[in-house]
Amino acid sequence: MGMPQVVIVGRPNVGKSSLFNWLAGKRLAIVDPTAGVTRDRVTHLIEIHHRFIELVDTGGMGVKDADNLTEQVEEQIQAAVDVAQLVLLVVDGRDGPVPLDDEVIKRLRYVSCPVLLVVNKIDAPSLEPQAAEFYRFGRKMVQISVKENRGKEELLEAIAERLPDPAPDETAPADPVMKVAIVGRRNVGKSTFVNTLAQAERMITSEVPGTTRDSVDVRFELDGQSWMAIDTPGFRRNKSVNTDVEFYSTHRAQRSIRRADVVLLFFDATQRISKVDKQLCDYIAQQYKPCMFVVNKWDQLAGTMPTEKWVAYLRDNFRTMGYVPIAFITGQTGKNVKAMLNHARMLFRQSLTRTPTARLNKLLRTAIEQNPPPIYQNRHPKIYYATQVAAQPPTIVLFCSDPQAISPQYQRWLLHMFRDELDFGEVPIKLYLRRREHDDASARHDD
């Protein structure tokens, strides 16, 4: 599994961003009494009891955004909750329960992960009895005060107790069931492709763009192995989404990408790449999902255009996705589909791969010897060691003298080296930079 994500939620002005900064140990999120300051998700790597997690700050639930971005803020909150392993529900201990807190509780009623109730602003022991009102929410409760630095250790302990068990170091079982999301702009043949997979008319297919308005799961078997295909609505440009149905179709399709193990991004061989394709690709990259570019309807161009020309066309339009494999298929007849799915399974296994620390650091030392980090502010930044802390996606933490000194260009070069030499060359890699503390020295020893 990937690195655990601990997501902070709650109504506006209960101290979510202050809590985020408090746990992170630095001022990262904007703290302001004005409701709605936080819109996008803010993430930070922290370590709790010798285990790394991603801490995620979100906007206030129920806030009416002054710039008419309420739907986008709510979508960002839902996206964070969908992938959370633990939710921290923050409430204001001085105000007590208010109606909007009840609404937040209702929204979290069916989440699959634990929810920990964090009562903030209990600045003194005399205020602790006021927190008793929150027991009616039926959640485990921790009382804290970010302002007065109270209850931090108790909160960290409660978080650690509720995290899922760490994944074993070995690779995942040989034949796990995998979920494949089929995405693309409208009318590229996604539902026809799903019907071919299922060998039945499980999906409504039509030449009318936008027939599929919801994400539908279709189970099928290939060579005795179980799969789940997620057919998704066709994407449209953001400014073209002008009805409730279209908005929620796009939202559900994005949610399908987030819960998929591998994403198949479909292109129509007879059509040019569009802005919608690029928006989709950006979203897949933001979610760190293994991806294949699938050029469908290739039978209509077979013999008239070499595949190399389309490959060059894709590489030129998606320059940051050079590691993504490309398949040419005919979804209606099933041509090349089996080979494509076998490659998709290989991507899934790559995403689950864990690299021993010894091998990773040997590669890192070789890379630094070949190309040291550029000078920053008249000093040579140092990278001391690396460790892989999670899989799906493979997540690597570099411990260095100054994270700001390692330029984005150098980080991309290191990722390129890792892909060339390690066992996950065709999937996204998440890279974190962390300043080495004195007590980290023991972590340099290879496993």
Image (cartoon, rainbow, N blue to C red):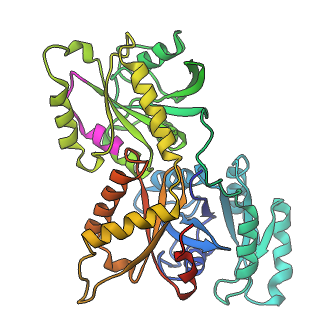
Q: How many badges with numbers are in the image?
A: 0
Does residue 209 appear to the left or right of 302 in the view shown?
A: right
Q: Residue at horizontal 37%, vertical 16%?
A: 331
Residue 99 versus residue 226: which sits nearer the camera?
Answer: 226
Asked if 32 appears above or below 329 in the picture, the reply is below
Q: Quadrant of residue 193?
A: top left
Q: Is residue 275 magenta?
A: yes
Q: Residue at horizontal 48%, vertical 75%?
A: 29
Which region shows up in magenta?
Answer: 269-281
Q: Is residue 295 visible?
A: yes
Does residue 179 appear to the left or right of 86 in the view shown?
A: left
Asked if 77 appears above or below 230 in the picture, the reply is below
Q: Is residue 370 magenta?
A: no
Does residue 259 appear to the left or right of 104 in the view shown?
A: left
Q: Is residue 238 visible?
A: no
Q: Residue at horizontal 55%, vertical 64%?
A: 56
Q: Residue at horizontal 41%, vertical 52%?
A: 422
Question: Residue 280: x percent and y percent?
Answer: 35, 41
